[in-house]
Amino acid sequence: MSGRGFLNDVTKLASRFFSDTREARKVLILDLGFLGDTVHLLPAAWAIRQAYLHAELSVMVAENVTSILQLTPWIDRVWGYPRFPKGPKPWQDLRRVMKLRREKFDAVINFVGSDRTSLLTRLSGARARLGRRPRRGTPLHWRFLVTHEVDHPYGLEPVYAQRWACSKKAGFPGVSPEFRITISEAMRAEVARAVGSGRPYFHVSPCTPQDLRQLPLSQLAELLNRLTDAYPKMDLVLSCAPNERERSRVDALLPLLHQAPLRTFSGSLDLPRLAALIAGSQLHLGGDSGALHLAQMTQAPAVAWFRRFEGLVDWKPIAPQYRCLIGEETPQGIEGIDTNALFHAADELLKASVSARV
């Protein structure tokens, strides 16, 4: 591409980024977070895709969540970065950096502001590098890392809205954030066959990555029993990760239920098929976990329980089809959420979901 419009390593306003790079032919978006970060990147990535219609668009995300981008065929190339269970030391990135530099990206975009992502942005070798000002302010070396800087507040709105607002400040098009994904009819049918009954179902994710984010088992069982009693023509489907901790929790839950789940998927679904399972449900119920992000991505209605913590605003969904109840963190899980409130939130959304699908 022509070098016209590209700038020296002097940080410029983000609003000039798209106009300075509109001729780009190879563009990379860097976001090295986990599943939630990748899902919340999608609206901004879609805005960037719309701007660079004829460019090759690559995205680098955590290696263990790359499969979710099978649902975004408008991304040309997906790069995995090893984050789980532990990321590499900076000097272990040498081969990856050399591979990035051989790609000769025209533009690299980073809305995260983390040290590792910002360093890779610089080492990519791209002439135009857009970075978000870090949460804790700009270190002395910041202006060496990026050519254009976007500044947007952290912690005042969901992460997807923050990322999308950054893209707008950089000059990219878009009227509102949009989770543009494609779940094929074949995949939907495959998941429906795996569920089996053909009846409506609600999906429950009983586990979260940390015990302190979970409802006590007795309270979760009471909630599910009330729902299955109130909706006898609706099936119960559970899912969890394929690790001993989550499977043990599910095993402990089952004897407490009046109605056995129609199906329990213990890590047997990959991320795209788990998304299809959630998308096909009448309602998703779960805590602050990856499954909730998939519900948000697919726009499935959801009831979620959260502990009160500093980053709550970042991850709590706010659209009309979500109900979020907040309790206090304890070593035994979340306490202080009323079971009646959980049931009425689920009942309200189920009635609306059933009505909308009739």
Image (cartoon, grey):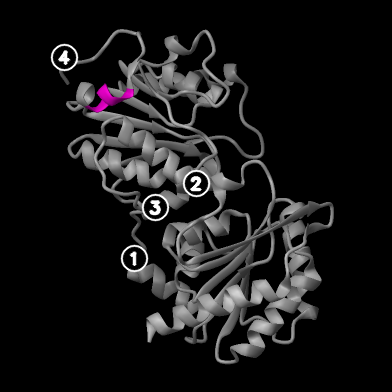
Q: In 3D space, how far apart are the residues under numbered discs 3 and 4 (Cα atoms)? A: 34 Å
Q: In 3D space, how far apart are the residues under numbered discs 2 and 1 (Cα atoms)? A: 28 Å
Residue where numbered disc 2 is placed: 158
Q: Amino acid at mark 4?
A: Arg
What secondary structure is found at the residue carrying circle 1?
Answer: loop
What secondary structure is found at the residue carrying circle 2?
Answer: loop
Residue where numbered disc 4 is placed: 4
Q: Which residues are magenta?
A: 14-18
Which quarter of the rendering shows the N terminus? top left
Q: x%, y% of residue 321?
A: 47, 67
Q: Label for residue 184?
A: 1
Overall secondary structure of the magenta stretch? helix
Which residue is rendered at x = 61% and y = 63% of the image? 304
Q: Give the mark nearest the N terminus, 3 or 4.
A: 4
Q: Give the mark nearest the N terminus, 2 or 1.
A: 2
Q: Amino acid at mark 2?
A: Pro
